[in-house]
Amino acid sequence: MVDQKKKRLSGKERRNQILQQAQYLCARKGFSGTTLDEIAKKAGVSRALIIQHFQNKEKLYEALIDYVFESHPMEEDPEIKKYMDEKDDYGVFKAYCQHVFKYMTKDKEHSPLRLIFFSMLEKPRLYEKHYEQRLSKGLTLLEKYISKRIKDGTFREIDPAHVAAAFSAVLTQLLIQEIVVPRFHDEKTFMNCIDTIIDLFINGLKK
């Protein structure tokens, strides 16, 4: 029987392990405030191994931004899928918010949202690159849903990208408050506030 403690990690598993620990440190201290040596120590690997996987500090940070955005694929969320199939507009927006809340506030001190904002402040080129990659892949999940509802004749003619961006901005602002200066303290209170926002958005979208 294989001793799991001694089991060697695959290259991908080791890479993800390094990225997990890099996220932990960078979300707390920022990109500029975190060194490769600190990441190596936290991950329990050598600096040389990090260089082997990522070449240099810049490439590691670039991989980390992608890793953060790819760690919670919304298209795989069963609740969001269910409400989209049912064309339940309120359900889609609510499930979307619940998904983001769960992922972003699970560990507030090391929240991916903190990392994203550090990237915007310290490494804007990396953040812009990620944003361009999103655009090249087409509409996001929320944008696609809004676009379909426009074609259905339920929502009025409006740019779905603008709606998704506006909704995301409001949600992000509330999440920042929850992470930095807690205002709601629990998911139930947070979602009560979100209910009002969803209602305003949906009523504004309907013909």
Image (cartoon, rainbow, N blue to C red):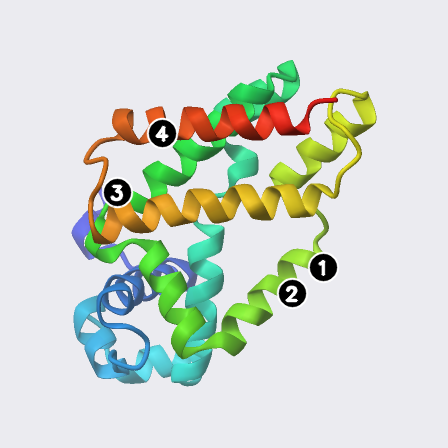
User: How dense is the environment of label 3, judged by Cα within 10 Å: few (below 14), some, or many (20 and up)?
Assistant: few
Question: Which of the two labelled residues, at mark 4 and mark 2, occupies the earlier sequence position?
Answer: 2
Label tally: 4
Mark 1 and mark 3: Cα distance apart in space: 30 Å
Give the residue at mark 1: 136
Which residue shows up at 59% across the image and 70% down it? 129
> Which quarter of the picture shows residue 118?
bottom left
Question: Helix, strand or loop at disc 1?
Answer: helix
Question: What's the residue type where badge 2 is placed?
Answer: Glu
Kind of element beneath mark 2: helix
Type of amino acid under label 4: Cys
Which residue is at the front of the view, 146 or 184? 184
Residue 43 in the image: state x and y as whole percent. Answer: 22, 67
| Residue contact at pointers 1 and 2, CB within 8 angstroms | yes
x%, y% of residue 165? 58, 48
Q: Residue at x 43, y 82 (%)?
A: 58
**Quadrant of the snapshot with the N terminus:** top left
Label 3 sits on residue: 106
- From the image, tell me which residue sits under label 2: 132
Give the Cα distance between marks 2 and 3.
Answer: 27 Å
Mark 2 or mark 3: name the one nearer the start of the chain: 3
Q: Give the Cα separation between the discs numbered 4 and 2.
A: 31 Å
**Residue 78 visible in the snapshot:** no
Q: Which residue is mark 4?
A: 193
Crowding near the residue tagged with mark 2, few <14, some 14–19, many ≥20 C-alpha atoms within 10 Å: few
Q: Are marks 2 and 3 in contact (CB under 8 Å)?
A: no
Which amino acid does the dot numbered 3 rest on? Answer: Lys
Residue at image position (45%, 65%) is: 65
